[in-house]
Amino acid sequence: MRSQIAGRLPSTAAPTRGLPDAGGTRLDDAGCPVPTGYVADRLDAGLPSGVVLWLRGDVGVATFDGGAVCRWEDVSGNGRHFLPVDATYPRFDATIISGRPAVVFSTRSRLERPDVLGLGPTQGRTIAVRSQVSDLTRRFGSFLQGNRANNWEYLELEQNTFMTSGMRAGVYLTANAYDSDLATSAAARTHLYSIATLDAGTQLPGALYYAVDGVQRTLTRTPGGNGPSGPGDDKVWPFTGAGFTSIGETSAAGFSGGAIGEVLVFDHPLDTSERAAVEAHLSR
């Protein structure tokens, strides 16, 4: 099953509570098509074990009429679906990334869930994303785990990290912002960010692996970094305060667009062969 989920605008009538409407589409109380329950086959895709989140642009993107995304379903079988939390909804586009479907984000249109995907506070992990941006000058976080109460970004895969040296792809970890040696680009790219451990005090960036299109990038600390007590000083800080995960994070006014076609999160740092398998899958 790889078809896009059709949707309808929510009506002013009583909630449908999943009952078929006149067109046969099942809607939830918000007027969004009910989850499909589809579970993708990890082995068929050639992916390693340990998948805790799998978002795909070609299946599981529920929309209202017109393409506004009202849910992005986790097809890993873990049921960790993402919902819109801003007044502006992201949009679905069927061909935006190399002719393949994706969710397109603009200013304040993120999707979010109120947990960190069941991962432990010191647990290593890997995030892999297929994305494409049209706005190269503003910050855009394709994946973020943090704390809204203190505005602290605990972990982020983004472009133009805080106080960037100038239009770079990069990553963020517990009050440490790192530019890579790669400039931002409007080309479709595969990003893979692996963290060996989140034990407090671990030296950075040695515990981090960041690759774009299968090529490992050099990471350099920017002057930026924010947290309850200031910059992270190239060390891991305790991760226990993180309480949400978001996709498509940007608050920059006028951000003109970032498309995300697929997101994979694993419960461990991937080894060389596992990384190659993920890269091959995302770049197909």
Image (spheres, rainbow, N blue to C red):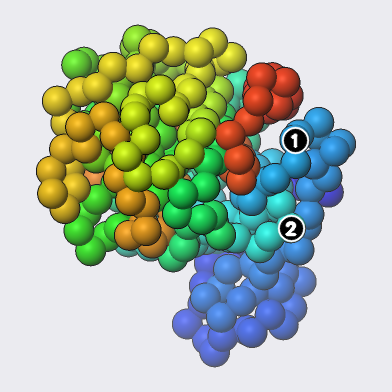
Q: What is the residue that sits farthest to the front in this orientation?
A: 201
Residue 11 location (% of width, % of height)? 51, 77
Residue 48 — which label?
Answer: 1
Res 126 quadrant in image:
top right
Above or below, 261 relative to 238: above
Question: Foreground: 136 or 141?
Answer: 141
Res 277 quadrant in image:
top right
Above or below, 12 relative to 206: below
Q: Secondary structure at mark 1?
A: loop
Residue 169 location (% of width, % of height)? 36, 21
Res 175 quadrant in image:
top left
85 to the left or right of 264: left
Residue 192 location (% of width, % of height)? 54, 27
Q: Residue at x 68, y 60 (%)?
A: 78
Q: Residue at x 44, y 65 (%)?
A: 114
Residue 77 — which label?
Answer: 2
Question: Foreground: 231 or 280?
Answer: 231
Q: Which mark sits nearer the N-terminus, 2 or 1? A: 1
Residue 73 location (% of width, % of height)? 63, 56
Question: Foreground: 140 or 180?
Answer: 180
